Image (cartoon, grey):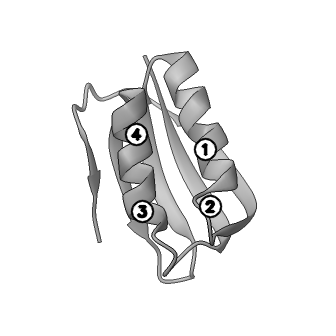
Amino acid sequence: MIRQRVIVHGRVQAVGFRYSALLEAKRLGVAGWIRNRSDGAVEAEIEGDESSVDAMLGWLDDGPPGADVTSISTTDLEPTGERGFRVTG
């Protein structure tokens, strides 16, 4: 199991990004959370097996229709054993 913190920059708020990410996370079976940040970015923590987390990172790099992702940054974290995926903030 691995866990990544992700910051997604670009036009990623007010385009359904978080709720589309929720659906994709459930489809991939990853755990964690996603939220809007006050600077206009979206922040998430994603936990799961390496291939599922990598797939989720790939989805976040594109985002849903209407989003325009300009960059993402990731940070390795220690897995917490979290279950489920949720939208916060």
Question: Based on the displayed image, in which of its 4 quarters is residue 40 positioned?
Answer: bottom right
Residue located 52% across and 66% down the image: 42
Q: Name the side, left or right, on which 50 lies relative to 67.
A: left
Determine which residue is flagged by label 4: 25
Q: Which of marks 4 and 3 is nearer the N terminus?
A: 3
Q: Where is residue 14 in the image (x, y as percent from the top left)?
A: 48, 81
Q: Earlier in the sequence, mark 3 or mark 1?
A: 3
Q: Which of marks 2 and 4 is in front?
A: 4
Q: Which of marks 4 and 1 is nearer the N terminus?
A: 4
Q: Where is residue 53 in the image (x, y as percent from the top left)?
A: 52, 29
Separation of marks 2 and 1 at Cα, in angstroms: 11 Å
Relative vertical location of residue 81 with respect to residue 32 in this rendering, above or below = above
Separation of marks 3 and 2 at Cα, in angstroms: 11 Å
Determine which residue is flagged by label 2: 8
The numbered disc on residue 18 is: 3
Label 3 Cα neighbours within 10 Å, binned few <14 / some 14-19 / many ≥20: many
Question: Based on the displayed image, in which of its 4 quarters is residue 59 positioned?
Answer: top right
Q: Position of residue 36 (x, y in %)?
A: 43, 72
Q: At numbered mark 2, what does the secondary structure look like: helix, strand or loop?
A: strand
Residue located 21% across and 31% down the image: 83
User: Do labels 4 and 3 touch, CB within 8 Å?
Assistant: no
Residue located 68% across and 53% down the image: 62
User: Do labels 4 and 1 touch, CB within 8 Å?
Assistant: no
